[in-house]
């Protein structure tokens, strides 16, 4: 059988259903000062609160594992369509006050990287507690095959308790695919991993499991990270 694509991402505290257009996301990747991690959590919680007040879907993931360690924060805005993005994106005056406070805080070290994404499947993860994201670059001429492998992997991972999101990077990105694994707790994630690794289908594709061979005929692994969603008190 073809090698399975593994990628994991999950952390959102909302669930949206697909309409005529795929769900869209705007992503900002911030680096914060090492001495201001606690202050950063409160600052980004403020963004979630403002989003709730004005009807804009905002999620924030605090990275724990990955390049940059726990000094990386990802801010996500989610939209049900391009039209909704154009109509609601930071349209409320409440954002003006928050954005001024955000930059005055000097919590963020530099200007962020930002890009847009489009949801490949039909529903987002529902309120996960932990998220792993594995990022893949389709090889030239193999994009459709990579998507099919993503779908096969989604079915396998969800059979072992994960909830899976699949995204494609768009404007500002590098055309990468993100395969996102969502779990309701660290304990649930560990249970799902153990179940997956002990399955016959996984062992057939990964005979040296738990060692993982990322070699794939239609895409290359370019990065991975784990993050936890900020929750409001």
Image (cartoon, rainbow, N blue to C red):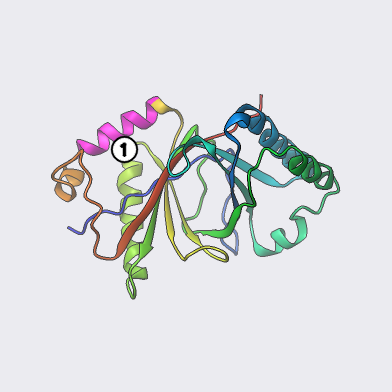
Pointer 1 local density, CA inside 10 Å: few below 14, some 14–19, many at least 20: some
Looking at the image, residue 95 sits to the left or right of residue 45; the answer is right
Looking at the image, residue 121 sits to the left or right of residue 219; the answer is right
Tag 1, which secondary structure?
Answer: loop
Residue, far right: 93
- Image location (x, y in percent) of residue 87: 77, 60
Residue visible at 71% across and 59% down in the picture? 84
Which corner quadrant holds the C terminus? top right
Magenta-colored stretch includes residue 114: no
Total count of labels: 1
Residue visible at 36% across and 43% down in the picture? 158
- Image location (x, y in percent) of residue 100: 81, 44
- Image location (x, y in percent) of residue 137: 38, 62
Q: Which residues are magenta?
A: 187-199
The dominant secondary structure in magenta is: helix
| Residue that carries the numbered disc 1 in the rendered image | 160
Magenta-colored stretch includes residue 194: yes
Looking at the image, residue 211 sits to the left or right of residue 92; the answer is left
Looking at the image, residue 161 sits to the left or right of residue 115; the answer is left
Which corner quadrant holds the N terminus? bottom left
Residue 139 sits in which quadrant? bottom left
- Image location (x, y in percent) of residue 8: 40, 45
Residue visible at 19% across and 35% down in the picture? 198
Residue 219 showing in the rendered view: yes
Residue, far bottom: 141
Image: 204 above or below 106: below
Residue visible at 52% across and 63% down in the picture? 173
Residue 181 showing in the rendered view: no
């Amino acid at each position: 059988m073809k090698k399975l694509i593994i990628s994991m991402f999950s952390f959102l505290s909302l669930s949206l259903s697909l309409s005529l257009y795929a769900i869209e996301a705007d992503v900002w990747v911030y680096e914060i000062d090492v001495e201001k991690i606690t202050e950063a959590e409160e600052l980004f919680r403020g963004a979630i609160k403002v989003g709730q007040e004005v009807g804009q879907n905002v999620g924030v993931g605090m990275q724990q594992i990955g390049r940059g360690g726990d000094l990386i924060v990802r801010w996500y805005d989610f939209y049900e369509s391009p039209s909704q993005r154009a109509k609601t994106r930071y349209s409320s005056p409440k954002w003006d006050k928050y954005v001024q406070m955000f930059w005055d805080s000097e919590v963020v070290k530099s200007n962020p990287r930002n890009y847009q994404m489009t949801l490949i499947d039909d529903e987002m993860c529902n309120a996960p507690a932990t998220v792993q994201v594995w990022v893949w670059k389709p090889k030239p001429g193999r994009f459709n095959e990579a998507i099919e492998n993503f779908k096969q992997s989604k079915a396998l991972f969800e059979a072992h308790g994960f909830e899976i999101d699949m995204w494609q990077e768009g404007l500002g990105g590098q055309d990468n695919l993100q395969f996102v694994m969502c779990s309701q707790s660290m304990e649930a994630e560990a249970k799902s991993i153990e179940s997956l690794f002990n399955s016959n289908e996984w062992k057939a594709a990964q005979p040296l499991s738990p060692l993982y061979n990322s070699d794939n005929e239609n895409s290359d692994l370019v990065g991975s990270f784990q993050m936890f969603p900020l929750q409001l008190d």
